[in-house]
Amino acid sequence: MKKVCVTGFCATIGSGSLVLSPDQAGPRLIAGTIVPGKKDGIFDIVGIVTFKRGEIFGYDGELPPSLLEDMAPLKEAEASNADTLAAAKLVRDARIEELEALGDGLTEDQQIELNALLAE
């Protein structure tokens, strides 16, 4: 199981298994997009599951290449509950640096993303 943090605007996953916090699992169970898996704390995806920027979760399986630019893998220590906000800030700051390094070469979408990150 890999721990990942969403670094893009959002990430959508349609298959696999997830490790979620109770706060993350509750609404998704009610919406019917996940069901309890065979082990405690693991959920199987049965619909489309969307995560917003900064959310950290465990994912079992290979991430589709289209999602790799919207997520960053985390070390186990970074993914602990106590470090969730710090890890999200590190990922956010790294993305800002990455976008600012492009300078005038930013696409319109990248400029919108950069403005949103700077406004947070």
Image (cartoon, rainbow, N blue to C red):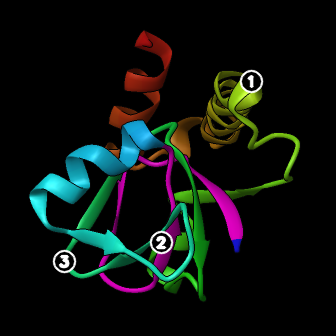
Q: Main secondary structure of the magenta part?
A: strand
Which residue position holds label 1?
Answer: 82
Counting other residues with Cα less than 10 Å from the Cα at mark 3, is it few (<14), some (14-19), or many (20 or more)? some
Q: Secondary structure at mark 3?
A: loop
Q: Evaluate if marks 3 and 1 touch, with contact meaning CB atoms under 8 Å apart.
A: no
Q: Residue at x 73, y 32 (%)?
A: 87
**Residue matched to label 3:** 47
Task: Please provide percent x and percent y for residue 83.
Answer: 76, 27
* Of the image marks 2 and 3, the number of the one nearer the N terminus: 3
Q: Amino acid at mark 3?
A: Gly
Which span is picked out in magenta? 2-21
In the rendering, which numbered label is found on residue 12? none
Residue in the image at 47% along x and 24% along y? 117
Residue at horizontal 88 percent and vertical 42 percent from the top: 77
Query: Could you tell which of marks 3 and 1 lies nearer the N-terminus?
Result: 3
Q: Quadrant of residue 103?
A: top right
Label 2: few (<14), some or many (≥20) within 10 Å?
some
7 is within the stretch colored magenta? yes
Q: Which picture quadrant has residue 85?
A: top right
Q: Which residue is mark 2?
A: 67
